Amino acid sequence: MEKLSQSLEDYLEKVLMLHQSKGNARLKNIASELGVKAPSAARAMRELKELGLVEQEPYGLISLTPRGLSAAKSILGRHTLLRRFLSLLGVSEANADADACLIEHVLSKESLGALKIL
């Protein structure tokens, strides 16, 4: 799979998180949770659909394809690992979550692998 932009990774991760917390993902919820306007979220969903990572009923629910689910789980796993690591260092929960979101997109696989032993 080609490398996704940070923005598309965030959208994919949010679709998975909404499925886990609410049982479904809708465009308005994705936009709200990411703090963007609906047209921006719609554009991102179109891109993810073209990449074969999501499926969307017209004006309806958004679901992950098997490839999308695999990618989203990987992204969320990186985020969770980094948040946990930062928390162990004494970083506040809010900052650990925000910083993990930034770091997860740029940290090398080698560095992530090293963190997994903690």
Image (cartoon, helix red, strand yellow):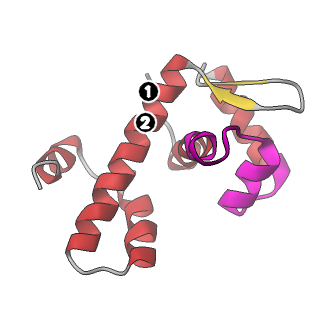
Label 1 sits on residue? 70
Q: Amino acid at mark 1?
A: Ser
In-front residue for pair 24/78: 24
Q: In the image, residue 24 lies at what x, y percent?
A: 70, 38
Residue 106 shows in this picture: no
Which quadrant does the C terminus fall into? bottom left
Please report the bounds of the magenta region as a residue range: 16-39
Q: Amino acid at mark 2?
A: Lys
Is 37 covered by the magenta stretch?
yes
Q: In the image, residue 1 lies at what x, y percent?
A: 43, 22
Task: Classify mark 1: helix, strand or loop.
Answer: helix
Label 2 sits on residue? 73
Task: Classify mark 2: helix, strand or loop.
Answer: helix
Q: Are marks 1 and 2 in contact (CB under 8 Å)?
A: yes
Secondary structure that dominates the magenta span: helix
Residue drawn at 83 percent across, 51 percent down? 38
Residue drawn at 78 percent across, 32 percent down? 61
